[in-house]
Amino acid sequence: MTGKDLMSRLRANRGSEPTLLVVGIVGYLALVLKSNGDLLEGNSIKGILIYLTVPILIGLAQLVVLAVGQMNLSVGALGGFLSVWIAALIVDSGLPPLLAAGIGIAGGALVGVVNGVLVVVTRINGFIVTLATMTILIGLQYRVAGTRTITLSDGWFTDFGSADVLNIPLIFIAALVVAAVLAFFLRRAVPGRRLLASGGNPLAARLSGISNDRSLILAHGLSGLIIGVAAVLTVMSAPGVNKSIGGDWLLPSFAAPIIGGAALAGGAVSVLGTILAAFIVRLVDVARAQYSLDPSLVNFTIGAVVLGTVVLGTIRENRAARAPKDPPKDTAKEAAPLAGSPS
Amino acid sequence: MTTQPILLAEKLEKVFPGVRALGGVNLTMAPGSVHALLGENGAGKSTMIKIITGVYRPDGGSLTLNGVERHFKSPHDAVIAGIGVVHQERNVVPEFSVAENMLLHQLPAKAGLVDREAMREQARRALDMIGLDVDLDEPVKGLSVAQTQLVEIAKALTTTDSKVLLLDEPTSALTLAETDRLLDVMRKLRDNGTSLLLVSHKLEEVFAIADTVTVLRDGESVLEAAPLGRFTTGEIVDLMVGRSHKASDFPARSVDRAQAPVLELDALSTGFGHRDVSLDVRRGEIVGLYGLVGAGRTELAKAVLGLDRIVGGGIRVAGKDVKIDNVGTALGRHHIGYVPENRKTEGLFLDQPLTMNIAVTVWARIRNFFGYVAKRRERDIAEHYVDRLGIKAAPRQFAGQLSGGNQQKVSLAKWLAADCEILIIDEPTVGIDVRTKAAFHELIWDLAADGMAILLITSDLPEMVTLADRIVVMRDSRVMGTVENSHHYGETSKAVIGLVHQTV
């Protein structure tokens, strides 16, 4: 990325990424001071990052759907179902973990594609379609898990889940790889650009020969695929999976991309912002442990931050929408000499 | 001309529910020419453009490009075939860079990845052609309206070997200097063999650049591919407004001009961009508000109703200065009603019965002490207006099930129920068949005869000449002048069009 590229990108986001970076660093340093440096120890860092893995991935799963101006309410239900299904395939059916993981990820992508196709074919809002699939998936999850907790016996699969390089968990690195691939896809790949164009202005996209239907299906499919990865990493790292897993994924999945600067109407998302936002949300959790605060405070804080971000974003949009109404006359004045027009 | 036409449209037809937008239009474009497509609002120009560019599919007729008959299934098909277009509406992805917006229809790619260098290079070439100096990497949302429009024009130029370029009102957001530059670009393209189709309301610019002209009126071509040089501006205007209109046979209605106006706008300026708009309406008077689409008429009405900020000047109702913050105040305190242009989205609750649709404005009056609105009272009111306006439906029917004309009557009925004294009626007969239209005109006429003050916004000039007493002409959010309506179509329409186009 050239310097000019980076600058225009930062300008485009009106600084939401740098702000999040500063908030994250300051927050972390404050907690480090409070803990008398305990948080700088390897185990603490590892603890923070392990529980940051899933929030990043489900945030990205929501982000890619937000990019086309849709929502995916089935993020948590799909993640939960896939987790118990993968675990059950390994434990009950005796499948090799690698095969089970592959089936899980493919299954996630398939469910996502089904979501997308339903939205395209029925023309019903994705909110309602994924609300329905969410309920179905919760039922399936319960069907597979029952009341038990499925625990994997030790093996390379679970070892990977707890392994780390210099105290950085491998599963966290895996999440970052997914994020990097997604960011690259959305920035550089032709289908990724088309997806964002469909979200940014469906009419302009259509007039440019872009199929908005294809963008919708692609976005939902990618969302399911990423949730599949999140499910695999969950099965690897969690001590066991049961019917309640995934139940608390929905709010964070929205919180991270929205705080990270995504426009709910579609077309504008930030992978980096999503990761930073997930990190900040994670810090709230760490702070609670650090200060032994009431757990309810965590949800309260995250909710307030989401609300504040959305309100700020709306104010910003309104201001931006109002601004360009008047200036055309001025820009015209300065544009004329540039043209060397004889008038 | 004996050369084979580059684009030939024969007997194009397009029917929308209730309206025949095009009824057998022909268009013949010669290579290397600038062809003007003219016509008043609703004559079918935009429909025509949308058919040629594959946005709509025609219901009849054929389209031949360079000797080959074409059936475009999507806008992309048309682009591939070599038809570039700049639509009237801005069509950009605001978050995307200038370069990417310009190449969105054919992103240069290597192995599935966007080739940014190639993209920038192609975009740069097109921008150089029109001499626009903007940062290729800047997101389009940071540009001014004029710059965005120029970017879209440049986008049409990136279409590789674009043989035909369609420009729908390309200069509506441009200044004179920018317009001049665009005309230069058009000349250059023409000399290189491209055929251009120009749709513009600015006749001076049409005469400056075009060599051939086709005029549409009421969905039919009244002048086909004629050399423009043979006509004067006046003759073209005559062809555009055309039809000798049947004089209205309504009973005479006189307005007491001596009385004080009930609604006065005094040098009103709004957040939307209106500057120094002054007009007044008396009891029993119909004042027309004419202008091209985008002249700011609807926006003016909305500002009066408190839906936009007033930044200067004032509004007087019955001689008193008033401040209107919202529609509730406008209706409740000042008895101003607004019948919106789009009845489906703004005028009606489609999934509710007529009773609710009509009585909604008077709930405050008919509710009892506890706030309960009795169904019987709603029905009484609805029945009264169904009867009075001749709405062909039962009060319990849902608004969504009615025909367009009846829906419009319901949309009007609720303001009558609310005892409005001032009524702003916006495009009352768009998409309504001819017979209902006449009935509606009579209704509006009678309302005024009964003493209502009416501000009528319509882009339908015959309708305007039929109904209005005076016609205020707007352009670019300003008042250009007022025309006393003689109810002689030719005379009045020429005066109005003269003001709109500022023909010298």
Image (spheres, coloured by chain):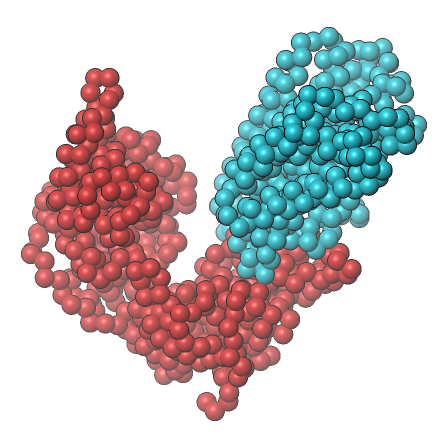
Chain colours: A cyan, B red
Q: Residue at x 70, y 27 (%)?
A: A145
Q: Is residue A183 above or below residue B404?
A: above
Nearest the eye: B335 or B113: B113
The picture places residue A165, in percent across and down from the top left corner, at 92, 30
Q: Is residue A71 visible?
A: yes
Q: A118 left or right of A43?
A: left
Nearest the eye: B141 or B279: B141
Q: A188 left or right of B95?
A: right
State the image quarter where residue A265 is shown.
top right
Q: Residue at the front extreme?
A: A93
Nearest the eye: B9 or B97: B9
Q: Residue at the left extreme?
A: B251
Q: B67 left or right of B115?
A: left
The picture places residue B355, in percent across and down from the top left corner, at 22, 36
Q: Residue at x 28, y 30 (%)?
A: B329
Q: B419 left or right of B327?
A: left
The picture places residue B237, in percent across and down from the top left corner, at 31, 71
Q: Is residue B455 visible?
A: no
The picture places residue B26, in percent across and down from the top left corner, at 39, 78
